[in-house]
Amino acid sequence: MKGKILIVDDEPQIRRVLKTALSPEDYLAVEATSAEEAFQRFREERFDLILLDVNMPGMNGLEACAEFRRTSDIAIIMLTVRNSEADRVAALDAGADDYVAKPFSMPELLARIRSCLRRVSYLTSNGPATIRFGNVEINCETRHVLVDGKDVRFTPKEFDLLHYLATRPNVTISRGKLLQIVWGPEYADELPYLHVFVNQIRKKIEPDPSTPRYVLTEWRVGYRFSGNP
């Protein structure tokens, strides 16, 4: 089995289509019709990824995503009928790893599921086991980040991005390359993803996120990590 996926959507047809498509790909799919039911399922079972609809009665998907993020780094893909840049940014700001607009093609969704579940191979095969800079410590084996000695929760993609930058100090890396390395080749033009994730990382590790010390923007090019690993 490639992974266990929680489908959270109030539309029976969407849940049925997703479950039917995921099964031949060797994913085990479990359904929930609301955010409240999803929380209950999540407390009782272990999942690898959540497909979370934005527009649901009761607690909506953005609120549910933020709630999941308070206690978990599980991969989350938001599903919605809206596809403006503002909607994508709102989903990513809520803690989603990815965003897919309805109607979507199953090959596209399956590719994004694979991207969310993958771990960049270099993370455990190359480089030091621990990276330290300022008051921050990255444990590359356990994928934990300590700030002032306290464990700070990172989503999988946030960790991948921070690790890639931190293992290449004082090297400017283009936005396109970062997107392709951390998310995959099909994400090369998804600049809002990178902007949101860099901001999230800064909020978690920078003493003053508005004036970053570690993750620096190189105007019109990309980002550079300034630290002493």
Image: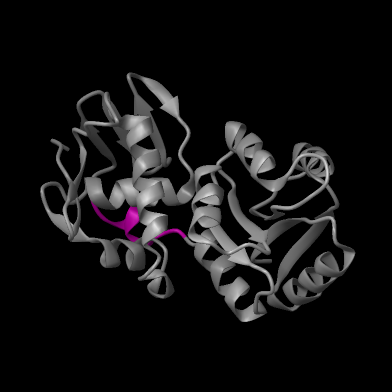
Q: Nearer the viewer, residue 107 or 54?
A: 54
Q: Is residue 151 left or right of residue 48?
A: left
Magenta span includes 176: no
Q: Is residue 59 above or below residue 191?
A: above
Q: Is residue 210 left or right of residue 104?
A: left
Residue closest to the far right: 12
Q: Position of residue 38 (x, y in %)?
A: 79, 44
Q: Quadrant of the C terminus?
A: top left
Q: Position of residue 166 (x, y in %)?
A: 23, 45
Task: Please tell me which residue is depicted at 36% across the width and 61% down the height of the picture.
Answer: 191
Q: Quadrant of the N terminus?
A: bottom right
Q: Position of residue 14 (x, y in %)?
A: 81, 68
Stretch in magenta: 119-127
Q: How many marks?
A: 0
Q: Is residue 170 above or below residue 111?
A: above
Task: Please tell me which residue is depicted at 69% across the width and 47% down the height of the picture.
Answer: 61
Q: Is residue 173 above or below residue 19?
A: above
Q: Nearer the viewer, residue 10 or 158?
A: 10
Q: Is residue 173 left or right of residue 95?
A: left
Q: Position of residue 158 (x, y in %)?
A: 41, 46
Task: Please tell me which residue is depicted at 32% across the width and 59% down the height of the picture.
Answer: 122
Examine the image and state in which quarter residue 25 appears: bottom right
Q: Is residue 152 above or below residue 58?
A: above
Examine the image and state in which quarter residue 95 appears: top right
Residue closest to the far left: 170
